[in-house]
Amino acid sequence: MQNRIFLSPPHMGGDELKYVKEAFDSNYIAPLGEFVNRFENSISNYTGAKSALALSSGTAAIHLALRVLGIKQGDKVLASTFTFIGSVAPIIYQNAEPVFVDSDNSWNADPNLVEDAIKKEKPKAFIVTHLYGQSADIKSIAQICQRYGVVLIEDAAESLGAKFENKHTGRYGRFGIYSFNGNKIITTSGGGMLISDDERDIEYAKKLSTQAREPKLWYEHTEIGYNYRMSNILAAIGVGQMEVLDKRIARKREIFEIYKNALSDIDEIEWMPEIDGSFGNRWLTTMSLKESNPFKVIEALSKENIESRPLWKPMHLQKIFKDAKFYGTGVSEALFNSGVCLPSPTALGDKEIEDIASIIRRSVCNSN
């Protein structure tokens, strides 16, 4: 049996270990030091955001955004249903009420449903997810939120480097967040980033992320905070990863094209679209099947020691959110029942990707 091929494993660029050694040599191992500042600055410079805050996870970044906004019990927060639970769990942390909105044919949040839900539910904020590295129709969504006075938080955990009309995802809302989990397009092993053009918001989030300590010689606290800061060691990895981000995006996009070309004659395969005006990072290559059972594809790949997964199970279908309000047309549920995330490691060669496509072909064709 061949060595396991993972869905989206880490891919180091070469300088990460050098930077980690520099951090060790400086003895700044704790959550402060040169590399935390350098990593934050690299994200700010890359995206154009005025401020960035390096944190322990993307979920922590969303939680801090809600805290800064003062979201509390009794408030409603709109969220994409077709996403990972880390996008929406912070709503529950704040004892607020989640309201979910479905996808349209872009697979991302449907702006029409967003407007309908906002008018009826009057939420304080909307957490929109840019799914699988592809930009949502974020300009339309931002305009809707502005029209009704709803604060927009962009969950760009999967879409670092993706753009809409040449503006980075994460930059249309009051807050944007990125994730550097081990499977993301670049990684710090675990970590996240909160960005904003409001430097006061980021300063307050920074205070909250360091146990809300007051600026005193002793430990003084007037509110509850969290231990959410990224360590200098992990930030050193991030500095090295940022140096190869554009190469990783280019390779992810190449992987998508290899799969698409290799399977172009199979009519029942539909690929996640890239909407007009957008540029995705293609973090994962994803497809849906019109007739075949996607779990047969997953099983066929698994037999060859190759990892693949279903698309996200929508949040409104999760038992823990069974009582949550949902505005939808069934698009995300249909995608969950028909879709597959394909292995997309940037270190794999073209021939290996083509071999995986051949396994997919046999599985799909034999099931019909």
Image (cartoon, helix red, strand yellow):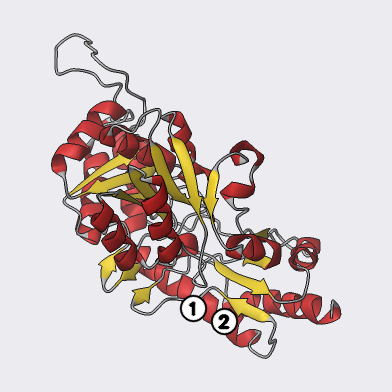
Judging by the rendered image, the residue that carries numbered circle 1 is: 254
Residue 185, picture quadrant? bottom left
Relative to the observer, which residue lies in front, 91 or 266? Answer: 91
Residue 293, picture quadrant? bottom right
x, y (%) of residue 262? Answer: 64, 85
Can the viewer see residue 71?
yes
Give the position of the N terminus as an image quadrant. Answer: bottom right
Judging by the rendered image, the residue that carries numbered circle 2 is: 258
Q: Are marks 1 and 2 in contact (CB under 8 Å)?
A: yes
Q: Amino acid at mark 1?
A: Glu
Q: Which residue is rendered at x = 37% and y = 68% of the image?
A: 137
Looking at the image, residue 231 sits to the left or right of residue 290; the answer is left
Q: Which residue is rendered at x = 33% and y = 37% of the image?
A: 66
Can the viewer see residue 57?
no
- The CA span between labels 1 and 2 is 6 Å
Task: Determine whether the residue tagged by mark 1 lies in a helix, strand or loop.
Answer: helix
Give the position of the C terminus as an image quadrant. Answer: bottom right
Q: Residues within 10 Å of mark 2 (few under 14, many from 20)?
A: some
Q: Which residue is rendered at x = 21% and y = 53% of the image?
A: 44
